[in-house]
């Protein structure tokens, strides 16, 4: 099935188990397309089900385009009237204009009116390639769309699809002629993920199927529908419990970042709000209907590290966040053990 074919409506997703089934179908397709990236795939799908967006720091040829394209083409259209492609890619360059991504009004001579021609931002999954190579004006236009799920052209607002999901990339090495995203704009991304080179064994597994295209194996696996993803997203929010000690732990981590001498600007309250659906989505991935301390420990560096500004000379934000989170997570673990002992 291609990106523009219509998929019949699937049965409604039921409970956390149903949401997990949707997540597993996507995970299996992405894993078949991109080898050795299971941890990255899980984080990207957690962001998808948490209604967030992802910024990847990667090297050329690391599989980001294949991953994003496979995700987009794995979400089948069951809304025959929207005419929205599943996947689009934008290669960001210094001469790009906001209208190049959002769309533009074209004058129809015969009808004597302007018609809006939608830009590539109207899609389910958008790969924003090398986002730091375009001007701040274009970056702001994309980040506004990410936050509001809408674009405004000539004072007219156009809604994006509810599923709209962005995977943006930037090269951590080649920084010449780039426009680095400021902290306030980085805050719009749920996760910032650094992709390292895969292991020797995984690289051999990448080469093993040659000359058979790996896409053939992906096509044999079942995909999901747009509605299933939206329903699974809602199930995570409504049926995965977030206990009060989890929220207290998040607040304590944020306060620790604001007091740490290695950090100039700590975690914002908005980051804590973004963290809750991410923790729920990860709990669902791990077959739980409640958020556990391990979810906080696993996601804290990816949620908070790109949202803090470090003092000059300190570069490892992940390590700083782990240090700030250690005490609150230890307190959370003790509270969980006491609660378990009381119910035993």
Image (cartoon, rainbow, N blue to C red):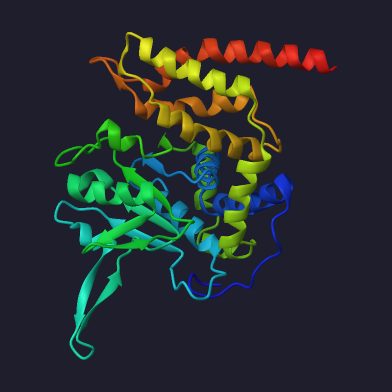
- Residue at horizontal 20 percent and vertical 37 percent from the top: 175
Q: Please state which of residues 154 and 19 is positioned toward the viewer in this rendering.
A: 154
**Residue lying farthest to the front in this orientation:** 155
The answer to whether one can see residue 225 in this image is: no
The answer to whether one can see residue 137 in this image is: yes
Left or right side of 313 for 302: right
Left or right side of 211 for 193: left
How far across and down, in percent of the image, does residue 275 sit?
A: 50, 32
**Residue lying farthest to the right in this orientation:** 344
Q: Quadrant of the rendered structure where residue 240 is?
A: top right
Q: Please state which of residues 160 and 316 is positioned toward the viewer in this rendering.
A: 160
The quarter of the rendered structure image containing the C terminus is top right
The quarter of the rendered structure image containing the N terminus is bottom right
How far across and down, in percent of the image, does residue 33 sit?
A: 53, 54
Left or right side of 338 for 314: left
Instruction: Say if 133 sits above or below 156 in the image.
Output: above
How far across and down, in percent of the image, does residue 7 sit?
A: 60, 72
How far across and down, in percent of the image, does residue 321 sit?
A: 43, 19
Q: Quadrant of the rendered structure where residue 201 is?
A: top right
Left or right side of 335 for 136: left
Q: Please state which of residues 66 and 283 is positioned toward the viewer in this rendering.
A: 283
Instruction: Say if 293 sits above or below 259 in the image.
Output: below
- Residue at horizontal 40 percent and vertical 45 percent from the top: 62
- Residue at horizontal 38 percent and vertical 23 percent from the top: 267
- Residue at horizontal 57 percent and vertical 69 percent from the top: 78
Instruction: Say if 190 sits above or below 151 in the image.
Output: above
Q: Quadrant of the rendered structure where residue 333 is?
A: top right
- Callout count: 0
């Amino acid at each position: 099935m291609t990106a523009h074919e219509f998929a019949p409506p699937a049965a409604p997703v039921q409970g956390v188990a149903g949401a997990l089934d949707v997540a597993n179908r996507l995970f299996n397709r992405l894993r078949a397309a991109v080898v050795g990236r299971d941890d990255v795939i899980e984080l990207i799908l957690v962001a998808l089900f948490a209604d967030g967006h992802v910024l990847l720091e990667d090297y050329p040829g690391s599989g980001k385009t294949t991953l994003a394209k496979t995700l987009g083409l794995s979400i089948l259209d069951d809304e025959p009237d929207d005419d929205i492609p599943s996947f689009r890619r934008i290669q960001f360059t210094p001469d790009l204009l906001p209208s190049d991504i959002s769309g533009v009004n074209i004058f129809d001579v015969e009808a004597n009116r302007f018609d809006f021609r939608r830009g590539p931002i109207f899609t389910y999954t958008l790969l924003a390639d090398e986002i730091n190579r375009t001007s701040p004006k274009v970056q702001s236009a994309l980040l506004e769309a990410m936050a509001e799920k809408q674009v405004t052209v000539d004072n007219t607002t156009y809604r994006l699809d509810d599923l709209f999901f962005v995977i943006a990339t930037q090269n951590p090495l080649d920084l010449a002629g780039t426009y680095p995203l400021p902290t306030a704009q980085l805050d719009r991304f749920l996760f910032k993920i650094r992709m390292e080179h895969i292991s020797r064994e995984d690289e051999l597994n990448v080469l093993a199927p040659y000359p058979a295209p790996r896409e053939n194996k992906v096509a044999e696996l079942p995909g999901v529908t747009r509605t299933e993803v939206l329903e699974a997203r809602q199930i995570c929010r409504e049926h995965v419990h977030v206990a009060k000690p989890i929220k207290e732990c998040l607040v304590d981590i944020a306060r620790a970042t604001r007091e740490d001498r290695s950090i100039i600007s700590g975690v914002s309250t908005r980051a804590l709000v973004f963290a809750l659906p991410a923790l729920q989505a990860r709990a669902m991935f791990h077959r739980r209907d409640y958020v556990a301390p391990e979810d906080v420990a696993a996601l804290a560096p990816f949620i908070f590290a790109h949202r803090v500004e470090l003092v000059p000379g300190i570069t490892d934000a992940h390590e700083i966040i782990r240090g700030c989170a250690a005490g609150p997570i230890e307190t959370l673990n003790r509270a969980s053990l006491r609660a378990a002992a009381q119910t035993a």
